[in-house]
Image (spheres, rainbow, N blue to C red):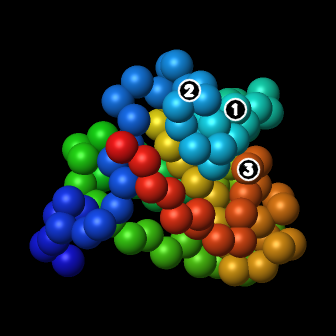
Amino acid sequence: MGKSISLYDLPTRPTNMDNVDCEFPREIQDEMSIQIPPEDYEAELKLNLEQHKAFSMIIDVIQKGKSGIFFIDGPGGTGKTFLYRALLAHLRSKKLMAIATATSGVAAAIMPGGRTRIPILRYQ
């Protein structure tokens, strides 16, 4: 939308995510302690052509430090959750914050660390 995230009153991201300890809010500690299932690491190598295209586009936007909104849609059984889990594993393995949210508890429950809301965090 042509705006910078710095225009909004949001907390800053900690600079060193390797040393997450008591100085960070519980939500960040929880996020950084999520165990990534081994099969999720392998998922990136098993993406089909469409999934890989979406995966690459999303990772590219993140790596370039840009903002973006992505809508992944498809009937049940087409691999949306598989793609989400591959994305979460990739980002979390690089010590990036990746919060899985969903509008229902059932959808959130299938994601490692999934939530039905995004917590509002404030820290310096």
Report the quarter where the N terminus lies: bottom left
Left or right side of 96 for 46? right
The residue that mark 1 highlights is: 33
Q: Out of 71 and 79, give the one closest to the viewer.
A: 71
- Identify the residue under disc 3: 113
* Mark 3 surroundings within 10 Å by alpha-carbon count, few (fewer than 14), some (14 through 19), many (20 or more): some
The kind of residue on which mark 3 rests is: Gly
Q: Nearer the viewer, mark 2 or mark 1?
A: 2
Q: What is the secondary structure assignment of the residue under circle 1?
A: loop
Tell me which numbered mark, 3 or 1, is placed earlier along the sequence. 1
Task: Assign a secondary structure to mark 2.
Answer: loop
Q: Is residue 72 visible?
A: yes
Residue at (86%, 72%) from the top-left corner? 106
Marked residue nearer the N-terminal end (3 or 2): 2
Q: Secondary structure at mark 3?
A: loop
Mark 2 and mark 1 residues within 8 Å of each other at the beta carbon: yes
Q: Determine crowd level at label 1: few under 14, some 14-19, many 20+ residues with C-alpha closer than 10 A.
A: few
- Rendered image: mark on residue 20: 2
